[in-house]
Image (tube, rainbow, N blue to C red):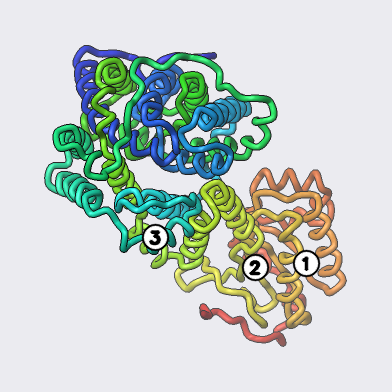
Amino acid sequence: MLSLFQGIRPIKRASALRDTLAGIALAAMNIPQTLGYTRIAGMPIVTGLYTLLFPLLAFAAFGSSRYLVVSADSATAAILAGGLNGMAPAASARYVALAGLVALLTALFLLLARLLELGFIADFLSQTVLAGFLTGVGFQVGIAVLGQTLGIQTHSRKTLVALAEVCRGLRTMHLPTLLVSGSVFAFVLLLRKFAPRIPGGLLAVVGSIAASATWNFAGHGIVIIGPVAGGLPHLSFPDVHWDDILPLVSVAASCAVMILTQSAATSRVYAERHQQTLDEDQDLLGLSAANAVAALSGAFVVNGSPTQTAMVESVGGSSQLAQVSTAAVVALVLLFLTRPLQYLPQCVLGALVLLVAVRLINLRSLEAIRRESPAEFALAVMTAVVVVAVGVEQGIVVAMIVSLLRIVQHSYHPRTGVMMLDADGTWKLIPTAPHTVTEPGLVMYRFGAALFYANASRFAKEVLELTGQAPSAVRWLVVDAEAITHLDYSAARVVLELQKNLKCAGVELGFARLPWDTKEDFNRHHVAEVIPPAMIFARLHDALDAFSKLPKANVLPDGPPARREVTS
């Protein structure tokens, strides 16, 4: 059942006033940042303001998160720019129409995800790979505006080529442009450090507009953005053709995946922090509606932004009413204050974007990953390199594939070993090795994943190696099945064949700590017909006790001694 305004209701007088003031503060901080994202996307400046209007209202109506701010975002802006590269000149009418089509297709993908209840897909992008992806986006975005902040002309939209152009043009950099960029960069950083509640970006924009109009920056060679269309946007479908859809499907799919994962991760953090319920599928509907109205209002793809969500929380916002207030402020800016924007130097937006890029490059997080998991660090770096060297759209695909491959890798190579009983009565796992037994004549082998077609042969190989090292000594092999939560058809055939081979070698196969749903798999695939009930144990201690009660003649003592120490 459709439920509207979940992120606002219930409205209380005290919190409503606080949210209204928070929305005004959010607009002050967010408008300059959004203008910077507009530069990343290659769109006309005014369309950045459009993303803070109807999309905010749409998510407030259809979403469930009370904190998530949905507007222009660096990651999706970079995906959009990379996908439209070469299809039309940046900021042209054709480019705007194609960007609207991407937003519309993205809305359809998100709506489909809602109908199929695919909110869980967000779980398949690991934080490690996502950190690498966002780091790559940071480098890509920073390099894209580097020439703009230095007053150096660049022509290529390929990251590495653009960096080479900047390096070649260092001797010709425009010093007044560099001075303005550096001043803005330093000013915002200082305010962020010593007065973080003051909207440094907004003050930088207002100050640079005033200085540009007063001292004629354009006459001194500092490029300004020029006239900005005023008034509220007109709602209409993008002026595109059917032939335009197919080339943009992959771009929209990449945006949808990025939106789904980033928005879900952000909204979860704040819902948990404030003990609030969250409906991820409802948020998908809100994100779909936000992108649909973005397309119809001449804007571009919008996303749940972590930085903007942090902003609204930092100024006291506690519901989507703050975002509604922000939209009202933006409407006033569009109606009455777009004229002064024409004096805004482009290098100021470049400096603000560069600040965003620096925050995306989280080297501290990557260093923590490197210390704890070098293998995951390598995957994060690989993802970042793909984003920088190839493109953002390809980077998100690599990020998804790498995350899924890690899941497959853990299932294909689970932790296995032989269970040993410590002197204090607890069980410990030691690596499999020749002559490793739990007790003379008994091997308790643990397999740490579900058994399926890909890892079943590894399971059988390790079992045969453990029993084949000293076939006269091993009489029972009991599988610790606590982690075997599933058994598919192919794996069941392997277990049946393994049981037959072990039986021929005089080894009884048993299972301990078998989950109830795996017992159903055993029954369905006829494995229970060849494993006697007496060889199914509720606990490892039960298996050990049953083995110890066997007649001594059944346990041959001439096998190698049990190895109890933990080997490295």
Name the residue beneath numbered marker 1.
Answer: 508
Is residue 332 shown above or below 313? above
The answer to whether 363 is drawn above or below residue 421 in the figure is above
Residue at 33%, 31% (x, y): give it.
275
Disc nearer the start of the sequence (2/1): 2
> Toward the viewer: 440 or 126?
126
Rendered residue at 36%/62% (across/down): 368
Circle 3: residue type: Leu
Residue at 51 percent across and 48 percent down: it is 392
Report the front residue among 204 and 550.
204
Choose mark 3 or mark 2, whichever is in front: 3
For the question of whether residue 282 can be seen, the reply is no
Query: Disc number at residue 377?
Result: none
Quadrant of the image containing the N terminus: top right
Q: Amino acid at mark 2?
A: Met
Which label belongs to residue 444?
A: 2
Q: Is residue 544 left or right of residue 2?
A: right
Q: Which mark is residue 366?
A: 3
Q: Nearer the viewer, mark 1 or mark 3?
A: 3
Would you place residue 71 above or below residue 479 in this image?
Answer: above
Q: Residues within 10 Å of mark 3 (few under 14, many from 20)?
A: some
Crowding at mark 2 (Cα within 10 Å: few <14, some 14-19, many 20+): many
Q: Is residue 465 visible?
A: yes
